[in-house]
Image (spheres, rainbow, N blue to C red):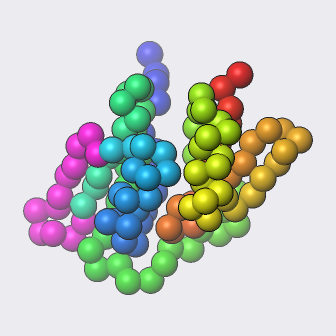
Amino acid sequence: MIKFNHFNFNVLDLEKSLKFYKEALDLTPVREKVAGDGSFKLVFLGDGKSDFTLELTYLTDRKEPYNLGECEFHLAFHVDEYEELYKKHKEMGIICFENPGMGIYFISDPDGYWIEIVPAR
């Protein structure tokens, strides 16, 4: 059997990213790993409902933003309270693309990763 485990985003400012994911999507740390030499820290975020996690990788020596190319990849979430979340994300100023015809929108995290918000149907 094969099943999804986690997805990774490299982040420049771990604390800023943790705050963003908690506030925007209510994701919280479920486990962490710190390199013995202090060169990196991994924080796995969960939604409390599924086993899937988002791994945030923080490289302690990294100073420049990551090159995300054309950002043709994204993470997606099904949400029950779409309208309330849309309003919250609009107030936070994090909506980067809307597609009303498809009934979806995207938010952008502090490092520029896109996250698709899809209403539960």
Residue drawn 28% across and 55% down? 42
Of 33 and 104, the residue lying toward us: 104
- Residue 72 in which image quadrant: bottom right
Q: Relative to residue 86, is residue 72 depicted above or below?
A: below
Query: Can residue 114 be spotted in the picture?
Result: no
- Residue 83 in which image quadrant: top right
Residue drawn 41% across and 26% down? 50
Rendering coords of residue 11 (x, y %): 41, 66
Q: Is residue 32 magenta?
A: yes
Rendering coords of residue 87 (x, y %): 64, 49
- Residue 96 in which image quadrant: bottom right
Of 26 and 30, the residue lying toward us: 26
What's drawn in magenta, residue-wise?
Answer: 29-40
Rendering coords of residue 56 (x, y %): 37, 55
Most distant residue in the right direction: 101
Residue drawn 42% across and 43% down? 26
Rendering coords of residue 47 (x, y %): 40, 35
Q: Is residue 54 left or right of residue 44?
A: right
Q: Is residue 74 left or right of residue 45?
A: right
Q: Relative to residue 99, is residue 14 depicted above or below?
A: below
Most distant residue in the bottom direction: 63
Most distant residue in the left direction: 36
Residue drawn 38% across and 83% down? 63
Q: Relative to residue 52, is residue 99 depicted above or below?
A: below
Q: How many marks?
A: 0
The C terminus lies in which quarter of the figure?
top right
The N terminus lies in which quarter of the figure?
top left
Q: Is residue 33 magenta?
A: yes
Query: Can residue 10 be spotted in the picture?
Result: yes
